[in-house]
Image (spheres, grey):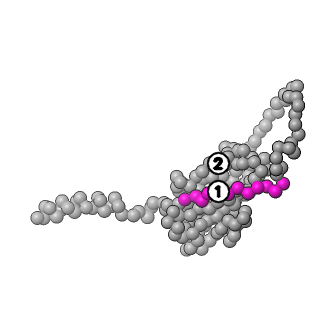
Amino acid sequence: MRARLLLALLLAVPLWYAVAPSSAQTPGFQLVEQVWFANPAAPKSDAALPSQSEPPSHTLYLPLIVENGPQAKIRFGTALVDGRLEGEASSFSYGITTLAYLIELPAGVEFLELREVWSFNGVEPPNLARTRIIPGGVSSVGSAIALTSNKPLPVGEYSLQLWIGGQRAGQASSEIQP
């Protein structure tokens, strides 16, 4: 009888550890669908562009040295409404269910690749990165992160890194405090 009890304990302990929640796991984050906001000064069609009837007769190549890519401005808030951040701040109290962000894009980045990579307390959850092509005529893009459970976001540091056209374009952090 004692041997059966010992065998049952030996089999149960590894199973209990396999299903016990770990505090080291990252929460089930999700990215909300991005919203692109138009640049009011952008041309509405190609009609405003001059036409070329003949190709140029010669080509001139100039060297181009780029040390830093285009820089974007990142702002955080509690909600994104009609292209505006509500509750804009750099740190928040525990209890918010979404961390909204607005990226103000630099000029001349249309049709380039925009890559966003989030980290939570220094760890990059795999489902918090995305790459998109910036459409023409936009000046900013906004979105939010939330938990899949719709519970309040955990206390910690949230950091967003941006790349535009393969070049680092910005980084910003926000904190949720207890």
The range drawn in magenta is 30-41
Task: Classify mark 2: residues with Cα within 10 Å, few (<14), some (14-19) or many (20+).
Answer: few
**Closer to us: 52 or 68:** 52
Eyeballing the image, is 64 above or below 130?
above
Eyeballing the image, is 53 above or below 162?
above
Q: Which mark is residue 128?
A: none
Q: Residue at x 64, y 48 (%)?
A: 132
The secondary element bearing badge 2 is classed as strand
Picture quadrant of residue 79: bottom right
Picture quadrant of residue 36: bottom right
Q: Which residue in the structure is indicated by mark 2?
A: 132
Task: Classify mark 1: residues with Cα within 10 Å, few (<14), some (14-19) or many (20+).
Answer: few
Q: Amino acid at mark 2?
A: Arg
Q: Which residue in the structure is indicated by mark 1?
A: 34
**Image x and y of residue 41, in percent:** 84, 54
Marks 2 and 1: CB-CB under 8 Å? yes
Q: Amino acid at mark 1?
A: Gln
**Image x and y of residue 105, in percent:** 74, 53
**Closer to us: 6 or 145:** 145
In the image, 1: left or right of 80? left
Tell me if residue 69 can be seen: no
Q: Residue at x 66, y 62 (%)?
A: 101
Return the residue found at the far left: 1
* Residue 32 belongs to the span the image colors magenta: yes
How far apart marks 2 and 1 lie (CA) works out to: 10 Å
